[in-house]
Image: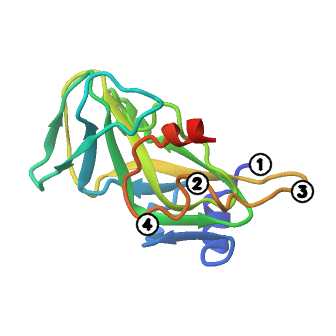
Amino acid sequence: MILSGREIKRQMGRDIIIEPFDERKINPNSYNLSLHNELLVYENNTLDMKKCNPTKKLIIPDEGLLLEPNTLYLGRTIEFTKTLKYVPMLEGRSSTGRLGLFIHVTAGFGDVGFTGYWTLEIFCVQPVRIYPEVEICQIYYHTIDGDYDLYESGKYQNNSGIQPSLMYKDFDK
């Protein structure tokens, strides 16, 4: 079951934390999250799963930043989220998708217990100008059935900013 917007509001500060929280961003069954003003892009055209791939930081100015196709941009939400009882899911807003802007290429599924900022995998079909603080995506919550363990010790848990791929750490095991 997906939580309604009213239930998200009721759970706020208990089993769901969104900081900062703005009641105006609640939808019938989701909550809009906003884009921070920083992006990362990989410095190399060829990436290696077994290596830490270098990135460079871009700042989105108030007048916007033009994104180009065939480039993966990593952004993050302004909002810090935490969930103790529900499975968080991230989707692009329909208005964003209708501009040919994908805000998570494959990683919209969160784990119950995830704590941190959401890294956004941003890709565009054609050039599109983006702006800081725009409501770019939405988070929604599923109930979970059965016994479960909280996601507590992962590569991306308790992050403080944009997280490039840390897959190379999987090969160190």
Determine which quarter of the picture holds residue 151. Answer: bottom right
Mark 3 vs mark 2: in front: 3
- What residue type is disc 2 on? Pro
Say few, some or many: other residues with alpha carbon within 10 Å of mark 2 (under 14 / 14 to 19 / 20 or more): few
Residue 1: assigned label: 1
| Residue located farthest toward the left when viewing the structure as drawn | 63
Reading the chain from its start, which is encountered first: label 2 or label 1? Answer: 1
Of the pair 50 and 6, the residue shown nearer to us: 50
The image shows residue 91, relative to residue 45, as above or below, that is below
Which residue is drawn at the image coordinates 67% and 77% (left, top)? Answer: 14
According to the image, what is the colour scheme of the structure? rainbow
SS at circle 4:
helix
x and y percentages locating residue 121 in the rendered image: 40, 38
x and y percentages locating residue 109 in the rendered image: 61, 42
Which residue is drawn at the image coordinates 36% and 26% (left, top)? Answer: 47
The image shows residue 45, relative to residue 55, as above or below, that is above
Q: What residue would you read off at disc 4?
A: 24
Residue 147: assigned label: 3
CA distance for labels 3 and 4: 34 Å
Q: Is residue 29 visible?
A: no
